[in-house]
Image (spheres, rainbow, N blue to C red):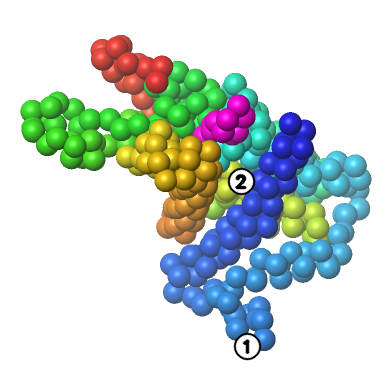
Amino acid sequence: MTLLLLAKTLTVLGVLLVGLVPLTAWLERRQSALMQDRVGPARVNVATATLGGLLQPLADAIARLAKESVRPRGADRVLHALAPALALVPVIVMVAVIPFGARYTIGSTTLSLVLADADAGVLWFFALSTLSGLGFVLAGWSSNSDYALLGAVRAGAQTVSCQIAMALSLVPMFAIYGTLRLSDMGLVQDRSIGLGGLLSNLDLGVAAEWLSLPAWGIVQNPVCFATFLLCAMAASRQPPFDSSSAGSEIAGGHTVEYSGVGLGLFQLAGVVQLVVIAGIVTAVFLGGSAIPWLSQDRIISAVSGFYGEGFATLICMGAHAIAFLLKLVSVIVLQVVLRGSMPRLRDDQLMDWLWKGMMPLALLNIFATGFVLVAVGGGGG
């Protein structure tokens, strides 16, 4: 079990740091360039081929490592050095609760594509997200700079506001699924739901099942999907919710006194947060690793007749992992499009939007969802 956990950890970290993070950094710059009618990254070549700028994230990483890290006079030596790691490490640890697949049984062995299948995986995400925000606050406070301190104050207020609204936005999904475990949420969504009573009055035979909808969270409660995605993006302190580091107002905010590796770690934390948010959204609202209209049992039973149940389970595992990654990349692209489409909010506008907009909407959605669940006798998966 120790070797299996080590192999899973190295695989997840490899997929994250070698695959998803560079791809996300490239997507962010490339998509923004397309939306703004610019060329985008196209300077890093292999011989005469630019490869569409795919090597630009590698060049950026090398540039950060090569630059000098300067600590301003009067800054707190320990906290100034610790803050970038405190911002990055919790975000990477969040990946442990993201289920890249379901649970699979091969003989007497049960496998799951999640590092830490915690009973309250969503709460793990909230706790680590708050801890990561503390790194941004410490960065500004320890820099002995007015701009950095102002950015830290904004980051602290934004973190508290976003966490409350984000947590409230997910409460209806807890009631619908009856669990806080992300892997169990994926299992609940690995089915289809009929289109009300319409199909029961039509003699469609087998076609009736294919005309049903996948039981994804976005289908059952689209308001939850919209509120959580926007609040999570705001919690990541990325555009258009980057008032704590607005270059035009406070010259970079909490990171104004960072350079070299320290600044690179903060930037890496921002990219990893995009991936983590996409993973949580995929697990809670997009069926996780489930393939629409093809449940795990159906896939295994269809393939096992040709290759045996064990090999069919492995094929199902691979198909689920690919499906999860495709959904995850789609949510990343959606975030990048939203970031490039919306103007930056002022700090007061952001607070008003969170406290007077998102929070009342989330509370109203909780009452509405509870009323519907009581009326239809649903909930709990």
Q: Residue at x 65, y 50 (%)?
A: 16
- Please tell me which residue lies in front, 247 or 317: 317
Residue 218, x across and y down, in percent: 36, 36
**Left or right: residue 324 compared with residue 243:** left
Tag 1: amino acid: Thr
Q: How many marks?
A: 2
Badge 1 crowding class, 10 Å Cα cut-off, few under 14, some 14 to 19, many 20 or more, is few
Q: Foreground mark, 1 or 2? A: 1
Residue 189, x across and y down, in percent: 40, 31
Which label is found at residue 48? Answer: 1
What secondary structure is the stretch in magenta mostly built from? Answer: strand
Tag 2: amino acid: Gln
Residue 76, x across and y down, in percent: 89, 43
Residue 156: in sight, yes or no?
A: no
Q: CA distance from mark 1 to mark 2?
A: 34 Å
Assign a secondary structure to mark 1. Answer: loop
Res 140 quadrant in image: top right
Looking at this view, name the residue that lies furthest to the bottom.
48
Assign a secondary structure to mark 2. Answer: helix
The range drawn in magenta is 102-112
Residue 52: in sight, yes or no?
A: yes
**Left or right: residue 275 compared with residue 86:** left
**Left or right: residue 57 compared with residue 286:** right
Residue 325, x across and y down, in percent: 51, 49
For the C terminus, the image quarter is top left
Q: Is residue 105 magenta?
A: yes
Look at mark 2 in the image and give the residue it sits on.
Answer: 273
Q: Is residue 375 above or below residue 280?
A: above
